[in-house]
């Protein structure tokens, strides 16, 4: 549905007036970006870049090494100068693109130097070195794209470094093999600690990037424990004394962070992580009931996020959570009444249940919209 149809529908349901509709349309037409123009510019730059790379690759062996190094230095310096002038001229999109290009050129230069001088590299050491060199760029960017990419590369390189170091690899095995949920709790607690530190430094861009990774990791961890992890008998043996110490220290740090945090926005993360800590505790003592525990954990997490979406009027998030809750109930239904689904009576019963859920979801969504409208008018 385009914006004209959407605004007409809103006006039809008395959500906005005709004056507001015309004002919104006028504003959207005034700030509308030339997508076709930008697309051609991007396509042109992409084709030129690929062509240059193809020419260099075809003649790579005959190009002298000092020409390669000088060209890389000139290219990096030119992009650095472009970053400075785009910042002073307040061209934010060009500035952010050049910052990302500058970081990628640094990574390419590291690879070039290693190739010319035949420097051996184990694992992701080059990416770790790149993370150190580009770390200052994290504090000059105004968009979360580069910080998110930097965090991804830094995390992978640190994990690779720990895996290649015998002492640190022992720690990783203690956390993630065979008790994956213990490692999940520790990882998310460390990320929340970093979150609070960045919050004190008032780094909004870094906070936005880190928030995205925390949400993505938490969703992946919860999905793993609920849908995949329960099929693996990794909790067949109880946690040993060292693992309980790690659990206790991590839990104490988590509770301290929760106590010191005063931001309402982050309280949702702490509540969800407390559920994961509780699941880890009970799953250790009730390994045979882990299927039920994982289902309860997922239902609790989805319900809390749904309540958060309802209270903060995030309608898209609320609808998404409603769909996920319905799917999770369907999963429980299949686990409990799997054999019943093969019969005609079971299919009829399933259809009635789904129609009931659809009717209730529709009614709840209408109530949600009315609540939003009342709060907006107030």
Image: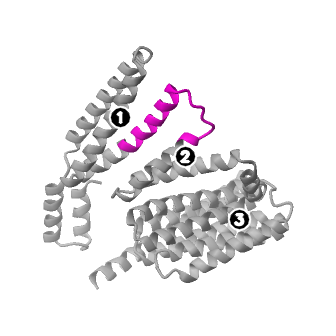
User: Gap in Å between the C-alphas at discs 3 and 2?
Assistant: 36 Å
Q: Which residue is drawn at 33% across and 58% down?
A: 142
Is residue 173 left or right of 196 when viewed as pictured? right
List the residue tagged with mark 1: 73
Name the quadrant of the N terminus.
bottom left
What stretch of residues is rendered in magenta? 102-126
- Name the secondary structure under disc 1: helix
Name the quadrant of the C terminus.
bottom left
- Name the secondary structure under disc 2: helix
Where is residue 48 drawn, in percent x and y? 29, 27
Q: Residues within 10 Å of mark 1 (few under 14, many from 20)?
A: some
List the residue tagged with mark 2: 128
Quarter-wise, where is residue 88 in the image? Answer: bottom left
List the residue tagged with mark 3: 294
Where is residue 353 drawn, in percent x and y? 61, 65
Where is residue 284 drawn, in percent x and y? 80, 68
User: Gap in Å between the C-alphas at discs 2 and 1?
Assistant: 21 Å
Disc on the earlier residue, 2 or 1: 1
Residue closest to the eye, 34 or 255: 255
Q: Is residue 348 magenta?
A: no
């Amino acid at each position: 549905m385009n914006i004209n149809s959407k605004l007409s529908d809103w006006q039809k349901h008395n959500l906005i007036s005709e004056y507001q509709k015309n004002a919104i349309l006028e504003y959207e037409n005034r700030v509308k970006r030339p997508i076709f123009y930008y697309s051609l510019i991007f396509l042109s730059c992409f084709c030129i870049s690929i062509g240059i790379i193809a020419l260099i690759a075809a003649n790579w062996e005959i190009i002298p090494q000092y020409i390669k190094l000088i060209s890389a230095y000139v290219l990096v310096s030119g992009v650095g100068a472009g970053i400075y002038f785009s910042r002073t001229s307040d061209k934010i999109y060009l500035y952010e693109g050049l910052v990302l290009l500058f970081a990628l050129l640094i990574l390419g230069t590291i690879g070039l130097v290693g190739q010319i001088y035949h420097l051996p590299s184990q694992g992701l050491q080059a990416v770790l070195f790149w993370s150190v060199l580009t770390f200052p760029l994290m504090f000059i960017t105004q968009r979360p794209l580069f910080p998110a990419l930097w965090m991804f590369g830094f995390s992978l390189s640190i994990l690779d470094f720990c895996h290649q170091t015998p002492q640190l690899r022992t720690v990783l095995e203690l956390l993630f093999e065979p008790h994956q949920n213990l490692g999940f709790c520790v990882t998310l607690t460390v990320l929340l600690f970093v979150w609070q530190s960045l919050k004190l430094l008032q780094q909004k861009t870094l906070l936005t990037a880190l928030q995205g990774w925390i949400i993505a990791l938490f969703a992946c961890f919860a999905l793993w424990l609920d849908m995949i992890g329960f099929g693996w008998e990794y909790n067949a043996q109880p946690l040993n004394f060292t693992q309980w110490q790690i659990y206790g220290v991590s839990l104490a740090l988590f509770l301290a962070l929760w106590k010191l945090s005063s931001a309402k926005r982050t309280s949702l993360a702490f509540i969800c992580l407390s559920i994961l800590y509780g699941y880890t505790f009970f799953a250790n003592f009730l390994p045979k009931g882990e299927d039920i525990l994982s289902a309860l954990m997922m239902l609790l997490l989805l319900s809390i996020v749904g309540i958060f979406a309802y209270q903060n009027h995030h309608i898209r998030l609320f609808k998404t959570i409603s769909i996920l809750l319905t799917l999770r109930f369907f999963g429980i239904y299949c686990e409990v009444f799997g054999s019943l689904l093969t019969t005609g009576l079971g299919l009829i019963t399933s259809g009635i249940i789904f129609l009931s859920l659809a009717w209730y979801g529709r009614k709840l969504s209408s109530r949600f919209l009315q609540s939003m409208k009342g709060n907006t008018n107030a």
